[in-house]
Image: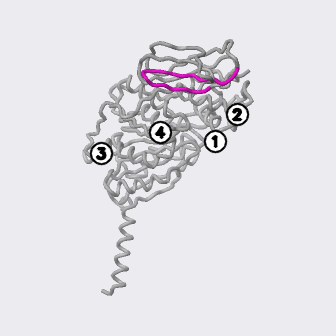
Amino acid sequence: MKKPMLLALVLVLLISGIALGQGTVEDVQFFSESLGELRWVQVYLPRGYSLDRGPKYPVIYFLHGIRGDHTSCPFLIDILDELIGNGTIEPVVVVKPDASCVPYNASFYTNSELNGAFEDYIVQDVREFVKRNYRIIPGRKKRSIMGHSMGGYGAMKLALKYPDIYTALASHSGPLEFNVLLMVALPYLLMEYPEGPPYYWAPYRGPFSGLSFSMAAAFSPNLTNPPFFVDFPLDEYANVRPSVFGRWLLHNPPKFATELPPDAELSIYFDCGMMDELGCYPQNLVFAGVLDQLGIPYEFESFMGGHADQLPVRIPIALEFLDNIMNPYTRGGGGKQLAHEESATRALILCQNAPNPFARETSIRFTLPTSGHARLTIYDSAGRSVERILDGKLSAGTHAVTWERNSVPSGTYFYRLTSDGNVLTKKMVVAR
């Protein structure tokens, strides 16, 4: 054989080998009975699936975040090709449904009279469509769910709510504790309204306003309340409206954790960056504490990073976790999750006071990782102690203290939290 022909043959074989190492991706539409409309789904099929006949596969449902759709996280395809190609995980079908919606671009995978029945869409419609049209192994033991941000919330909520459908879940940077979310987000929300109270809440004022209205559309919709058709959880002075926020708490992940049957066999993985810009990290820490109190096994990892910048690194870890659960005999994982061992740095958390600046009183919230002695002291800009507003033993969890300025003059002050040798300090402003 002449050298040019031999070289050409080798190149053809090499190119064919590369192609065989890749899965295929299909963007397909189907009619969702729950939503009453056509919806897009992206499906990843592992190498070899294109054969007319072949084996059935486990399936993972991947849920996207706010303002995303079925094409979000395109790097997931390359990750799957690599992990399957090098034998790190078994071949798997991955389904990415489109859960975008109007008017606020975020369904939170929840049934809402404003957004639509997106919980039913995921749990019923998408699952039935995949079962009818793809070679997947039936039964919960080969079915998992994962997601990022809003999708991380959706994965956690739906798996906890339907452990008879999903065997394992992975949540990346999800908002997992609404009480902490409100506490952490409130100062940033108020910064989007520099004119101060009374506040006229609107979705276009900034990212935290947009997020708040997206959640309200999912958890407290009100079609009789124009122009935004939601009930907002705060009044015009930024006080919590219990009747509205109580509706949010019906969708709070800790609620579903408390309702998880004792005999449920659900494997749980979640992670979050310690510099998460949306305040998800303290939520994840508190949620981990809830699981500890309930005796529910889980794996939680914290890492240096923000809300999404480390996602290409975190997804492979989650995929290996899910693969280990769904394929216990081929992967050697045993398919059981051990009771949680501390894998993350539990942190003392001190939140920005709210409102800030303030004229009469302000609320200071903080989270203790363990029970212990806590001291909260106010200092002026010269470092002189103004008032000690807390000094005593507290339980682990989130606490709030209200400070009334009384005769303290306007200006810049600092509040310092001390607990078990750890010290955190933040600045606040007393207005005229």
Tag 1 residue: 102
Q: Amino acid at mark 4?
A: Gly
Picture quadrant where residue 357 is located = top right
Residue 154 visible in the current orientation = no
The CA span between labels 1 and 2 is 16 Å
- State the CA–CA distance, disc 4 to disc 1: 29 Å
User: Where is residue 160 shown, x and y percent of the image?
Assistant: 42, 32
Over which residues does the magenta segment extend?
410-427
Callout 2 amino acid: Ala
Residue 171 is drawn in which quadrant? top left
Residue at image point 44% right, 16% down: 373
Label 1 CA crowd tier, 10 Å (few <14, some 14–19, many 20+): few
| Front tag of 2 and 3 | 2
Position of residue 144 in the picture relative to residue 227 (left or right): left
* Residue 285 on the magenta segment: no
Give the quarter of the image for residue 34.
top right
Packing grade of label 3 (10 A; few <14, some 14-19, many >=20) is: some
Q: Is residue 375 above or below residue 250?
A: above
Numbered mark located on residue 212 in the image: none
Q: Residues within 10 Å of mark 2 (few under 14, many from 20)?
A: some
Q: Is residue 426 visible?
A: yes
Tag 3, which secondary structure?
Answer: loop
Of the image marks 4 and 3, the number of the one nearer the N terminus: 4
C-alpha gap between disc 3 and disc 1: 38 Å
Report which residue position mark 3 lands on.
327
